[in-house]
Amino acid sequence: MSERAADDGLISVTVNDGKYTIQQTSPGTWEALRYGEEWPAFRGSGPDNLHVALAYEIAALREQVADLQRKVNGCQWYWPEDDTSSDACVENPFEVLEWDKDGTVAAVSRGGIIETRYYAILPAAEDADSDDDFEVDEATHEAAQNKVNAELARRIPPQVAA
């Protein structure tokens, strides 16, 4: 299971312990290999659209898995399994066991920051259709602040010139 880096925008996906490879050799040109050699079934025509679409899908899914694995690898906080409070949080799984050094096996939960998002709440506006608060949930601080600022600006009545 390997892939060529997409630095050049071309993809290569290998599956089944290296048996099959589909790779883009140039934009719009694909080849299929079996054990690293040209696959006779695709000689002259190259892989069909189904195989190309599956290669793109596999490459995208592998990138998502790699991204999630990087996030999991960054999770370095440990708690006793039954107490995930911040008071019980430590940086080393063996710190959880410090009080119990008699060989007892204990479950230790691992966690960390998977994602940081930016939230804000304003009370419902007087002209709102409901009494629900105005809620902001954005991926960046700037986007959240812009949304809050826009809502506050919308709520300020226009000034009448004297």
Image: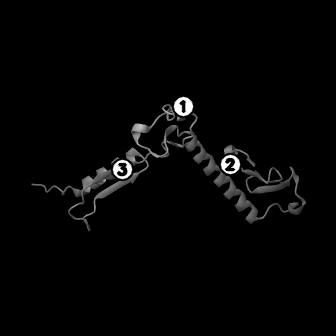
Q: Which amino acid does label 1 sit on?
A: Lys
Rendered-image quadrant of the C terminus: bottom left
Disc 3 secondary structure class = strand
For disc 1, the neighbor class at 10 Å (few under 14, some 14 to 19, many from 20) is few
- Rounded to the nearest angstrom, the CA distance separating label 3 from label 2 is 36 Å
What residue is shown at x 56% (from left), y 38% (from top)? 104
What residue is shown at x 18% (from left), y 57% (from top)? 158
Disc 2 secondary structure class = loop
Q: From the image, state whether disc 1 or disc 3 is nearer to you.
A: 1
x, y (%) of residue 115? 47, 46
- Rounded to the nearest angstrom, the CA distance separating label 1 from label 3 is 43 Å
Q: What residue type is labelled 2?
A: Gly
Query: Mark 3 = which residue?
Result: 119
Q: From the image, state whether disc 3 or disc 2 is nearer to you.
A: 3
x, y (%) of residue 124? 24, 60
Between discs 2 and 1, the one toward the N terminus: 2
Residue positioned most to the right: 40
Query: Mark 1 = which residue?
Result: 101
Decide if residue 76 is on the left or right side of residue 135. right
State the residue in front, 90 or 81.
Answer: 81
Query: Mark 2 = which residue?
Result: 9
State the residue in front, 74 or 95.
Answer: 95
Instruction: Answer whether labels 3 and 2 touch (C-beta < 8 Å).
Output: no
x, y (%) of residue 2? 74, 47
Disc 1 secondary structure class = loop
What residue is shown at x 73% (from left), y 53% (from top)? 27
Between discs 3 and 2, the one toward the N terminus: 2
Q: Which amino acid does label 3 sit on?
A: Tyr
Decide if residue 23 is on the left or right side of residue 43. left
Q: From the image, state whether disc 2 or disc 1 is nearer to you.
A: 1
Say above or below: 82 vs 96: below
Instruction: Answer whether labels 1 and 3 touch (C-beta < 8 Å).
Output: no
